[in-house]
Image (cartoon, grey):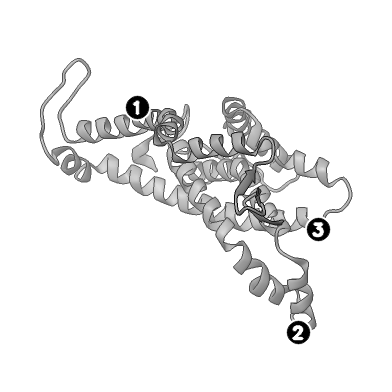
Amino acid sequence: MAASLVECVVEFKTLDGDVAKVVPRGDGHARTLSDVLVSDASVAYTFVAPAFFLLLFLVAYPFALSVWFSLSDARVGDAGGFIGLDNFQRLLTSSIFLQTLQNSIVFTALALGLKTVFGMVLALLLFRITRFKRLVRGAVLLPFIVPTALSTLVWWWMFEPLYSVVNWTLRALHVVNHDIPWLPDPYLAMFSVILVNTWRGLPFFAITLLAGLVAIPRELYEAAESDGAGPIGRFWHVTVPLVKPVLAVVILFSTIFTLVGGGLRPAPGGPQVDDL
């Protein structure tokens, strides 16, 4: 009597030439359920349907509606009609819009550059910390988790012209002998909002880049060091190339967050749009 094992099915051949198959207990039911889940297209559509409708009604429909509004003269209570690219033409000839666009580009570019540089520096420092590293990494996240309304009020109070704690500190250290108009001055106001945005977005850069640094194998640094590469050489030829994918994703998300959530608005006692 010969026996062969094929896909967990045992075949027994008798002396008369008959073949008997024995299926292990439980395998038949498991295989049947697996075949149903894999081959039945209706089950797949059932699992995909909730996510599909969620994207359809919360993403696709609002996007299509916003495109229609941009091409029409619709107003509140009035459906309006199709007017083509007239809205875009009016925007491109508006001095307020062009000035706002320029302010947003300058604000985003400078804030993004500062967050990239200081985020990499902070990530390298966190990577080298060995004592109390969990406590330090948790403390670094504080600016990112503080409610926006609370941090806005605190920073506004710090730069407020009359009771500015920044001016008081600078005068106490004999750095300046007069109050600095942080918010009324257009250029200082731009500097102030860039500083606040950098402070808030720095933990996002640092922690994400730290995750990329931890994933780099130590053998690569040892091989570079054995080839004579110094700290700067190891940073440019090992760290930067391997962190580039993570850095690209962080820069992309930060650009979106900065443009959407960091727009410049007139503040009480601060410059208006035309002044910036």
Q: Is residue 18 above or below residue 245?
A: above
For the residue pair 85 and 185, the one nearer the viewer reads as 85
Q: How far apart are marks 3 and 2 (CA)?
A: 22 Å
Q: Which of marks 3 and 1 is nearer the N terminus?
A: 1
Which residue lies most toward the front here? 16
Side of 149 relative to 120 (left or right): left
Location of mark 1 (residue): 57
Q: Distance between the residues labelled 3 and 1?
A: 47 Å
Label 1 crowding class (10 Å Cα cut-off): few <14, some 14-19, many 20+? Answer: few
Q: Label for residue 227?
A: 2
Location of mark 3 (residue): 128
Label 2 crowding class (10 Å Cα cut-off): few <14, some 14-19, many 20+? Answer: few
Query: Dot 2 lies on which element?
Result: loop
Q: Where is residue 93 in the image (x, y as percent from the top left)?
A: 19, 44
Please state which amino acid type lies under the numbered disc 3: Arg
Query: Dot 1 lies on which element?
Result: helix
What residue sits 34% from the left and 31% below the top? 56
Image quadrant where residue 259 sits: top left
